[in-house]
């Protein structure tokens, strides 16, 4: 992230004051003129985002009050689909990190990461990228297709499959996608299977990362 960038508004939600202070320090060191708002629970974070109207990033603790696993992340993404969310946690479990991406997070930052790494991760996420620690990212990138190859493969998806992929990128589950599209859940599962095959990836996480790599959007 260019240090000259300014005007960012970030909500840091964590029930530990020391973690909030560390995140604030990383933000102010890496972003010029950043406006940071603190929250100690998911409900407080939602209230702040609702009140501000325009938020560039929410940094969300995985295990704070109100989160209930990834349910809190999914709820926040559903209410504010255009606001990127970076998860933070003490865990270094790569499976948990990838699951966070499946539920709509734009990144997963271990609390043990150096402040410089945290700042770098936040910069990538604000630029519209997906960020994971290197070892987790290697596992999520699957075949490691080039940008041009991903573009070509996206072009092979049907309009309905593109809609399903878009909703996957927003963190929606199969049953939620089925409701939105007024189809059966089995139909959605079939679309997801076809999407993974056409994109040459092996998981929803890899499909979502491929789509977000191109800042993928569908047009109604």
Image: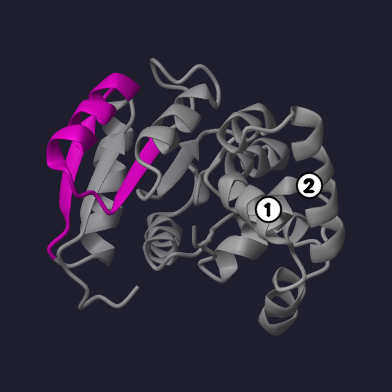
For this view, does 190 lie left or right of residue 212? right
Asked if residue 96 is among those painted magenta in the image, a careful observer would answer: no
70 is higher (above) or lower (below) than 172: above
Q: Which mark is residue 206?
A: none
Give how far across and how far down residue 194 sits, in percent.
84, 53
For label 2, the crowd category at 10 Å Cα-Cα, with few meaning under 14, some 14 to 19 and many 20 or more, is: many
Q: Are marks 1 and 2 in contact (CB under 8 Å)?
A: yes
Give the label on residue 160, or none.
1
**x, y percent for residue 57:** 32, 50
Q: Is residue 12 above or below residue 7?
A: above
Residue 113 placement, left or right of 160: left
Rounded to the nearest angstrom, the CA distance separating label 1 from label 2 is 8 Å
The residue depicted at 50 percent of the width and 67 percent of the height is: 215
Q: Residue 39 at x, y = what percent? A: 24, 29
Q: Is residue 44 magenta?
A: yes
Numbered range of the magenta stretch = 33-60
């Amino acid at each position: 992230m260019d240090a000259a960038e300014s005007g960012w508004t970030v909500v840091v939600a964590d029930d530990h004051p020391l973690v909030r202070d560390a995140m604030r320090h990383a933000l102010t060191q890496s972003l010029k003129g950043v406006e940071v708002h603190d929250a100690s629970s998911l409900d407080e974070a939602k209230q702040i985002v609702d009140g501000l109207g325009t938020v560039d990033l929410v940094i969300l603790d995985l295990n704070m009050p109100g989160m209930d696993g990834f349910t809190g992340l999914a709820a926040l993404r559903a209410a504010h689909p255009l606001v990127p969310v970076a998860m933070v946690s003490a865990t270094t479990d790569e499976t948990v990190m990838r699951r966070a991406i499946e539920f709509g997070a734009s990144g997963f930052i271990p609390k043990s990461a150096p402040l410089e790494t945290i700042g770098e991760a936040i910069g990538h996420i604000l630029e519209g990228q997906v960020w994971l620690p290197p070892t987790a990212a290697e596992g999520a990138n699957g075949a490691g297709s080039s940008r041009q190859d991903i573009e070509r493969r996206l072009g092979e998806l049907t309009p309905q499959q593109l809609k399903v992929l878009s909703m996957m990128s927003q963190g929606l589950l199969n049953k939620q996608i089925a409701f939105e599209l007024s189809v059966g859940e089995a139909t959605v599962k079939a679309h997801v299977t076809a999407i993974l095959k056409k994109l040459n990836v092996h998981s929803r996480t890899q499909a979502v990362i491929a789509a977000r790599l191109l800042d993928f959007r569908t047009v109604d």
